[in-house]
Image (cartoon, rainbow, N blue to C red):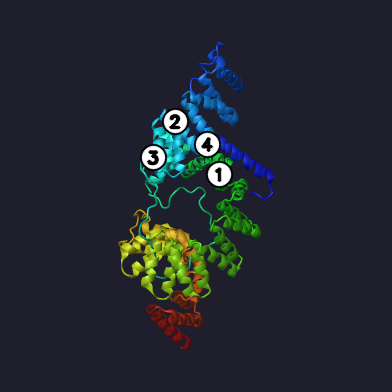
């Protein structure tokens, strides 16, 4: 950040501008070839010439120039011009130009251009260019382009480029690319092959862009009708931070041609090796994506040290992922101070995770001020986590109006939770159309709540097609209800693979229904291997799905693995499953632990399990506790099902007769 009155900074900026101007001039000052071969009569060896200082070289050329040596006049003028001594250079350049030296004519044009005499400069460049000077043709081409005369610019730049002049080739490529001319790449390549780092960088970008152009297809969608477990997807507490080093483009072709990407990487590498900081950033991103983190970090560091804020930010993410949060914070701070909103967001998230809410808020505001809309969204998340709902709504709304799709979804959730479904729906729609998968899912829930299952299914299907786990579950449930088992299985597999315990259970039930009857057990037969359906039941059971736990227990018991059955029944029962408690009681009773079995049946019966109540009634009857037996019979009649109620009624009558006998 530059503060008013920072004289040292302003002076340094001025020096940088002067240096930049001199460097630009150096690019077009034409070197004089074979000057040292013709100097004065003093004999010199090549080694002497190579080892002489600039002062000695100047003195030697000055002596020769004063004797009228054309080559030395031209060389001395070029040397003084490079040094910035325009007054000293001009007489020598004019003298050499008058004698027909084309390098001097070009360099005289450079001198005049620096003094602000652009038209006179162009005249001398034309003289030199016509005589075959590639640097002069390049300078003349740039002169015409600055004045909007593109045909003349192209003509002279092409003259320079075809003579192998790297700067001419690059300038021609830039002109052609501006006109979307396919010939631009050829000249970028020509300049890059001669070591022009900006050309190498832009050639790499062109190659990369060709194979990673955004692919736009029809909207994908969502999930099935509102059913078990459907909940609004509410934004979490994690800060929204953009990717560390984004590659150009949007959604990309999953299988781009490797040869062109490989070539692009080579050109990025060449430009980066020559100090191009943005090429180093791109190269780091390529290497990071490929998992070569150490080398990626080296290029990010190189770019960051040259002042590339995005590279400093990316390096911070790399260090954070490696567990070094302190070093990450240092680089994020550097990037954020250089105006990188992504880094400011990362610092905000870091401080929020530490409970330093005020510092987090300050960095989120800095991100927002830097033009990063995630800053407003993250401020909304921060306020929502503190139950500052009006402020959260304000920040979500600000980000949503700026086009932040997840902020639009979050705003809609707040409105819906406040009972404003009509106000929420447009924001859900806006977010979903912008690509928010959670918003598409939430629209499904919204319409399911209105009993509009058809529209709900459309949105669920859109979210499911984009990989939304809960949406895929809902589509699977809807397909099962409609009898479309194949579609149901496909979506349930997606949801189960995404970690949904309910989907894993329902998929297992679909597969279970297809299993053939195992038939009677045969003594000595090998133990049956676990089927796919049992594996899905187990996956759901391991995630705490109680019905799946009971089913896994039943399948284990069917295989004769009573210890495994006991484990799963017990886990389900302790989590509140009445079926688990009943089945555990059966298992314990068979093993002779009738007292413990009664405890589990009591728990199941009190939770509404009719068969457990009947078992307790039978136990009480066997023990002669007739009143207790009648109590459980009444409970079994009340709970059912019909067969149990009928048996319980007969037993109750028998106990009544026994009591009144």
Q: Residues within 10 Å of mark 3 (few under 14, many from 20)?
A: many
Residue ID for mark 1: 308
Q: Position of residue 309 (x, y in %)?
A: 56, 46
Residue situated in front as seen by the camera: 210 or 325: 210
Q: Residue at x 50, y 51 (%)?
A: 243
Marks 1/2: CA distance?
42 Å
The tag earlier along the polypeptide, 3 or 4, is 4
The tag earlier along the polypeptide, 3 or 2, is 2
Residue ID for mark 2: 127
The tag earlier along the polypeptide, 4 or 1, is 4
Marks 3/4: CA distance?
30 Å
Residue 223 visible here: no
- Report if the CB atoms under discs 4 and 2 are less than 8 Å apart: no
Give the image quarter of residue 219: bottom left
Give the image quarter of residue 306: top right
Front of the two marks 3 and 4: 4
The tag earlier along the polypeptide, 4 or 2, is 4
Residue 20 position (above or below residue 622): above
Residue ID for mark 4: 113
**Count of numbered marks:** 4
- Report if the CB atoms under discs 1 and 3 are less than 8 Å apart: no
Q: Position of residue 190 (x, y in %)?
A: 40, 34
Marks 4/2: CA distance?
15 Å
- Report if the CB atoms under discs 1 and 2 are less than 8 Å apart: no
Asked if residue 354 lies left or right of residue 46, the reply is right
């Amino acid at each position: 950040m530059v503060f008013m009155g920072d004289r040292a900074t302003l002076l340094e900026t001025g020096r940088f501008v002067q240096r930049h101007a001199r460097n630009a001039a150096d690019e077009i000052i034409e070197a004089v070839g074979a000057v040292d071969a013709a100097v004065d009569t003093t004999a010199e060896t090549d080694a002497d010439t190579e080892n002489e200082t600039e002062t000695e070289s100047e003195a030697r050329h000055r002596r020769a120039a004063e004797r009228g040596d054309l080559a030395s006049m031209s060389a001395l003028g070029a040397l003084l011009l490079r040094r910035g001594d325009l007054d000293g250079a001009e007489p020598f350049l004019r003298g050499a130009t008058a004698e027909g030296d084309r390098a001097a004519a070009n360099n005289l044009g450079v001198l005049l251009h620096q003094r602000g005499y652009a038209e006179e400069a162009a005249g001398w460049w034309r003289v030199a260019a016509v005589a075959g000077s590639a640097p002069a043709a390049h300078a003349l081409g740039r002169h015409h382009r600055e004045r909007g005369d593109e045909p003349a610019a192209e003509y002279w730049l092409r003259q320079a480029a075809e003579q192998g002049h790297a700067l001419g080739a690059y300038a021609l490529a830039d002109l052609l690319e501006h006109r979307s001319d396919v010939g631009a790449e050829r000249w970028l390549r020509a300049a890059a092959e001669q070591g022009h780092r900006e050309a190498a960088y832009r050639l790499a970008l062109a190659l990369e862009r060709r194979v990673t152009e955004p692919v736009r297809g029809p909207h994908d969608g969502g999930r099935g009708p509102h059913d078990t477990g459907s909940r609004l997807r509410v934004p979490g507490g994690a800060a929204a931070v953009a990717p560390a080093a984004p590659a150009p483009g949007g959604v990309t072709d999953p299988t781009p041609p490797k040869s062109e990407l490989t070539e692009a990487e080579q050109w990025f590498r060449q430009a980066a090796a020559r100090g191009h900081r943005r090429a180093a950033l791109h190269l780091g991103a390529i290497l990071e994506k490929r998992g070569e983190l150490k080398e990626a970090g080296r290029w990010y560091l190189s770019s960051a040290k040259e002042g590339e804020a995005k590279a400093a930010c990316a390096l911070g993410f790399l260090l954070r992922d490696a567990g070094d949060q302190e070093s990450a914070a240092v680089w994020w701070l550097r990037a954020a101070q250089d105006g990188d909103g992504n880094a400011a967001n990362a610092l905000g998230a870091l401080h929020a995770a530490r409970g330093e809410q005020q510092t987090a808020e300050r960095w989120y505001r800095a991100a927002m001020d830097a033009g990063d809309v995630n800053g407003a969204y993250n401020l909304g998340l921060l306020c929502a986590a503190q139950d500052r709902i009006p402020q959260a709504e304000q920040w979500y709304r600000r980000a949503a109006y700026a086009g932040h799709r997840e902020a639009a979804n979050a705003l809609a959730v707040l409105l819906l939770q406040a009972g404003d479904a009509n106000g929420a729906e447009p924001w859900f729609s806006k977010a979903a159309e912008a690509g928010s998968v959670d918003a598409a899912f939430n629209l499904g829930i919204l319409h399911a709540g209105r009993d509009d299952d058809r529209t709900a299914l459309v949105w669920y299907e859109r979210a499911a097609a984009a990989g939304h786990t809960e949406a895929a579950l809902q589509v699977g449930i809807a397909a099962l209800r409609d009898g479309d088992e194949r579609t149901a299985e496909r979506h349930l597999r997606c949801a189960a693979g995404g970690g949904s315990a309910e989907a894993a259970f329902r998929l297992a039930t679909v597969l279970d229904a297809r299993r053939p009857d195992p038939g009677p057990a045969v003594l000595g037969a090998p133990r049956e291997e676990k089927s796919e359906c049992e594996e899905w039941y187990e996956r759901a059971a391991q995630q705490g799905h109680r019905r799946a736990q009971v089913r896994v227990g039943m399948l284990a018991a069917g295989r004769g693995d009573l210890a495994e059955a006991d484990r799963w029944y017990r886990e389900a029962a302790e989590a509140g499953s009445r079926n688990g408690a009943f089945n555990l009681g059966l298992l314990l009773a068979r093993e002779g632990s009738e007292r413990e079995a009664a405890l589990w049946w009591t728990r199941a019966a009190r939770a509404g399990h009719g068969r457990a109540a009947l078992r307790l009634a039978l136990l009480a009857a066997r023990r002669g506790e007739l009143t207790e037996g009648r109590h459980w019979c009444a409970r079994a009649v009340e709970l059912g099902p019909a067969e149990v109620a009928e048996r319980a009624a007969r037993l109750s009558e028998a106990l009544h007769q026994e009591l009144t006998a």
